[in-house]
Image (cartoon, helix red, strand yellow):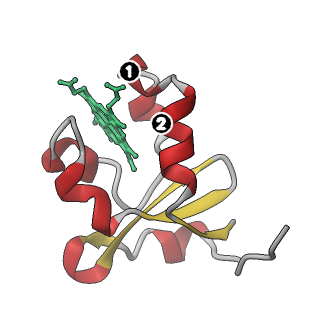
């Protein structure tokens, strides 16, 4: 199991646009999903609502994400931990 760099929520919050990279958190994991923004089945605009912060409040409203294949996809974008 590899070790990941640690980031603060403030650092994650500086990545809120494709220009600055798009980072999100899920639990204590940090993801750079910039390359997924345009591929998101729910549209780039919706994904960007969570940019720089936690996915959980949004995913609580959109239960379509509550499936194993969604977390598997997310895992590929992991860049760090809180
Ligand atoms: C659908 C991933 C963020 C709204 C999906 C699907 C995936 C996905 C894989 C298709 C699921 C399926 O049909 O089996 C992600 C990832 C996100 C993210 C990796 C963040 C990194 C968000 C956010 C919102 C959102 C923040 C809302 C604010 C939606 C909606 C759909 C969807 C509405 C359904 C689209 C449709 O079927 O018409 N997402 N999502 N997503 N997502 Fe996301």
Percent from the top left, x then y, of residue 17? 23, 70
Label 2 beta carbon within 8 A of ligand 1: yes
> Which of the pair 20/8 is nearer the observer?
20
Instruction: Say which element carries label 2.
Output: helix
Numbered mark located on residue 28 in the image = none
Pick the quarter of the image with the C terminus.
bottom right
Residue positioned 22% across, 73% down in the render: 18
In the rendered view, would you say 35 is above or below 67?
below
Percent from the top left, x then y, of residue 54? 49, 48
Residue to which mark 1 is pinned: 64
In the rendered view, would you say 29 is above or below 56?
below
Q: Earlier in the sequence, mark 2 or mark 1?
A: 1
Percent from the top left, x then y, of residue 19? 20, 81
Label 1 beta carbon within 8 A of ligand 1: yes
Residue positioned 48% across, 47% down in the render: 73
Residue to which mark 2 is pinned: 70
Residue positioned 69% across, 67% down in the render: 81
Mark 2–mark 1 CB contact (< 8 Å): yes
């Amino acid at each position: 199991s590899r070790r990941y760099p640690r980031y603060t929520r403030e650092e994650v919050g500086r990545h809120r646009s494709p220009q600055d990279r798009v980072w999100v958190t899920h639990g204590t994991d940090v993801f750079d999903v910039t390359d997924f923004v345009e591929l998101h089945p729910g549209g780039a605009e919706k994904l960007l609502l969570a940019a720089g912060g936690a996915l959980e409040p949004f995913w609580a409203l959109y239960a379509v994400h509550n499936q194993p294949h969604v977390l598997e996809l997310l895992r590929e974008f992991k860049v760090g931990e809180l």
